[in-house]
Image: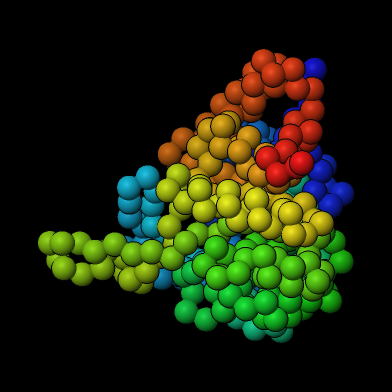
Amino acid sequence: MIDLSTELAGIRLANPLVAASGVFGYGEEYARLGDIRWFGAVSVKGTTLEPREGNPPPRVCETPSGMLNSIGLENPGAEVAARKKIPWLRQFGVPIIVNISGNTYEEFSELGAIFSDVEGISALEVNVSCPNVASGGLTFGMDARSSYRATLSVRKTWKGPLIVKLTPNSPDIVSIARAAVEGGADILSLINTLIGMAIDIKTRRPVLGNVTGGLSGPAIKPVALRCVYQVSQAVEVPIIGMGGVSSYRDVLEFIMAGASAVGIGAGLLVDPLLPKKILADLEEYCREEGIATLTGLTGCAWRE
């Protein structure tokens, strides 16, 4: 019997796969294409205090080995998510992570308070790293003290497991990680997207309506692996690694780099059945390698 389960700060996951917030929405669209129960946990769309319409179109464009997105945190707001979206998602019995983003420390605290009263949430994920909003997210994630204060602001009102999602755009992601843990993070997730842009040579203008956007997909996996490898050796909390996951090999690399769980984002847009395929391939790999428990591979790439 192959055991693919893992644990994140007391949250038991049947397998290490986490639906990343950037593409999963609140699960309604994905449920028409795949089975939410294929995931060990799901992280819902980045949610703000008030509803957001998001950035002007075009919002996405394909790039070599990846894609740019500039959605701008379009979402119905915390109250709608709490009253309608989360209750619907509970029916699948999969741990629910709510990704939150605020423009001020007070907003982060208020978001923590709102979701503290919602049944069935396993963890909050503090987004200090979104590159698509003019104020807020990116600023917090680029500075250690700001990351600490944002984390602490949520911790004051949210007593459950707390995740902080880190940006690779910081020049020193290890310092940001340590600051988040000091502020009360129980888990870290990394990485969010890299900042990028594309230009249409016919119109001679930026492709995205917001000019810049977040680069994701296989192109960023080497950067993501490096970040997970570094951060996992610098902090004592579990890590959700992500960035360019499109196969079981990618999942194994992140686990070996130090991740306890692995997020899938852009890969779901290419193939909604990807998690089912990855789980089957992980079991086959473990059988071939004589591995009974997948967690035994966590951090093996840096262990002496």
Q: Is residue 300 left or right of residue 248?
A: right
In this rendering, the answer to whether 217 lies above or below 281 is below
Answer yes or no: is residue 21 visible. Answer: no
In this rendering, the answer to whether 64 lies above or below 281 is below
Q: Quadrant of the N terminus?
A: top right
* Residue at image location 47% in from the left, 61% down from the top: 194
Answer yes or no: is residue 177 visible. Answer: yes
168 vs 67, nearest the viewer? 168
Q: Quadrant of residue 113?
A: bottom right
**Percent position of residue 144, x then y:** 67, 77
For this orientation, the residue located farthest to the left is: 202
**Percent position of residue 6, x then y:** 79, 39
* Residue at image location 47% in from the left, 79% down from the top: 134
**Percent position of residue 210, x then y:** 36, 72
109 vs 65, nearest the viewer? 65
**Percent position of residue 228, x then y:** 64, 52
Count of marks placed on residues: 0
* Residue at image location 29% in from the left, 62% down from the top: 198
* Residue at image location 65% in from the left, 62% down from the top: 165
For this orientation, the residue located farthest to the front is: 304
Q: Is residue 208 left or right of residue 284?
A: left
Q: Quadrant of the C terminus?
A: top right
Model colouring: rainbow
284 vs 55, nearest the viewer? 284
Q: Quadrant of residue 249?
A: top right
Q: Is residue 266 left or right of residue 42?
A: left
